[in-house]
Image (tube, helix red, strand yellow):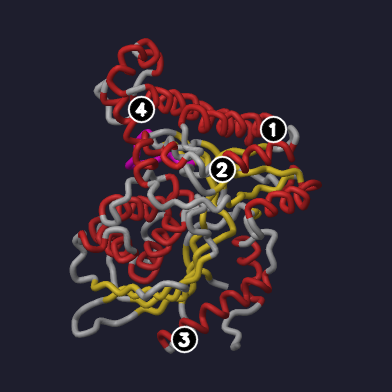
Amino acid sequence: MKNYVDSSLNNIFSKIYPNESTDFHINRWNNLITEHVKNTEDSHPRLFSASGRTELAGNHTDHNNGKVLAASIQLDTIAAVTKQADTNGEQFAEIHSEGYPPVKISLSDLSARKEEEGRTDALVRGIANYIKENGGKTGGFTATTSSRVLKGSGLSSSAALEVLVGSIFNELYNNGRFTPVQLAVFGQKAENNYFNKPCGLMDQIACAVGGAVAIDFKDNSNPVVESVSADFAAEGYKLAIVDTGGDHADLTDDYAAVPLEMKNVAKLFGEDTLRNVDESVFTERISEIREQTGDRAILRALHFFEENKRVDSMLNALKNEDMQNFFKYVEESGNSSFKYLQNVFSTRFYKNQGISLALALTESILNGRGASRVHGGGFAGTIQVYVPEDIFDRYKLSMEKVFGEGSVVPLAIRQMPVGEIKP
């Protein structure tokens, strides 16, 4: 295999992939470019990377204009990209993704298409549309991509792809004029309005900005993003997820019900989201509300109010390097998600409780050290764990006996935002 990249990228790779072998990533990028040459004959493509993300606090709060803590991680989606000229006056965006059929769309018509809903085509078309709506330019390119962001793991593989595509348009045709947060907004709008999946903005911002961030979505069109230091390794802990192997098929209704029920409560107060509802007034009217929304909606609203406050407490704990209080709040967040938000398993598939089982086994192994909670959207998928370094190998071995080899995935916080990789 020809070497297209070498140790000249070691410095940047050490920032993108902390605690991982730079030799591994040199090989990975060389494999990617080799495939790209097959697609384009371009042996000097431009290189891009967008991270996955992990949610640290704020489980299901962003879609109701709440607060979250999240972080970019070392698992990323990478792309080798070649700018393409017009073809008979028409421009095309073409993406070859490892393990998937190629995607090729014309950029001459950027209106949403019903037949593309749920497909990558819709995301690319939508992102191109919102870039143009905001005064930017689009143009043709061919990209070859590969991803280590595990699908269905709560690490936001779709958001990583969205901000990656936005970054490609941004660098190739707009001289980098759009900020990472703007690219995140374009991705979210494309997912909502073109892909037809309701989602908040946390995933895209966390994938785009880099590092650990506190995000306040009170003004969803202009979220407040604050960077914060979060070095768990320096405190003697490994951050990881455990993939329980749950099937996300047929869970769309479960996910959609969470923001819907919260917003149904808000509507009773003349508001669109719970963030604008006075908690004390809500508490006074619970007896009346339950007759109109049912009890689960009230429990989910209670989770929202407490989780929103918990984000502030966890942010302060990180700023003060107070890991014990941080872990206490992690456990509180997980308990609230389990009891009140109720997103640890679907009541329609009550025999499948992989997340509950993983949390129970983790609690037994950690024995009061570290912390664990449901990760991401829930109902199936992953838990998040903070494991003391001295027992991590034992923890990994024990959990993989139950959930399979490779189910325990260590995470590291990446400091670089989405964008082009240059020596």
Badges 2 and 4: C-beta atoms under 8 Å apart?
A: no
What whole-number distance in Å separates the C-alpha atoms at marks 4 and 3? Answer: 51 Å
Measured as percent of width and height from the top left, residue 423 is found at 57, 73
Residue at screen point 55% across, 53% down = 245
Which residue does the numbered mark 2 point to in the structure image? 355
Residue at screen point 63% across, 36% down = 318
Above or below, comparing residue 46 to residue 199 in the picture: below
Above or below, comparing residue 385 to residue 400 in the picture: above
Q: Is residue 328 left or right of residue 288?
A: right
Which residue does the numbered mark 1 point to in the structure image? 322
Q: Amino acid at mark 1?
A: Asp
What whole-number distance in Å separates the C-alpha atoms at marks 1 and 4? Answer: 30 Å
Measured as percent of width and height from the top left, residue 83 is found at 36, 78
Residue 170 shows which numbered tag? none
Q: Amino acid at mark 2?
A: Ile
Which residue does the numbered mark 4 point to in the structure image? 274
Above or below, comparing residue 121 to residue 158 in the picture: below
Residue 399 is covered by the magenta coloring: no
Measured as percent of width and height from the top left, residue 385 is found at 64, 43
Q: Is residue 310 left or right of residue 94?
A: right
Badges 4 and 3: C-beta atoms under 8 Å apart?
A: no
Q: Magenta part of the protein: which range?
A: 218-225
Q: Amino acid at mark 3?
A: Val
What whole-number distance in Å separates the C-alpha atoms at marks 2 and 4? Answer: 27 Å
Lower position in the chain sequence, tag 1 or tag 2: 1
Secondary element under disc 3, as helix, strand or loop, is helix
Main secondary structure of the magenta stretch: loop
Which residue does the numbered mark 3 point to in the structure image? 37
* Residue nearer the viewer, 54 or 14: 54
> Which quadrant of the figure contains the N terminus?
bottom right
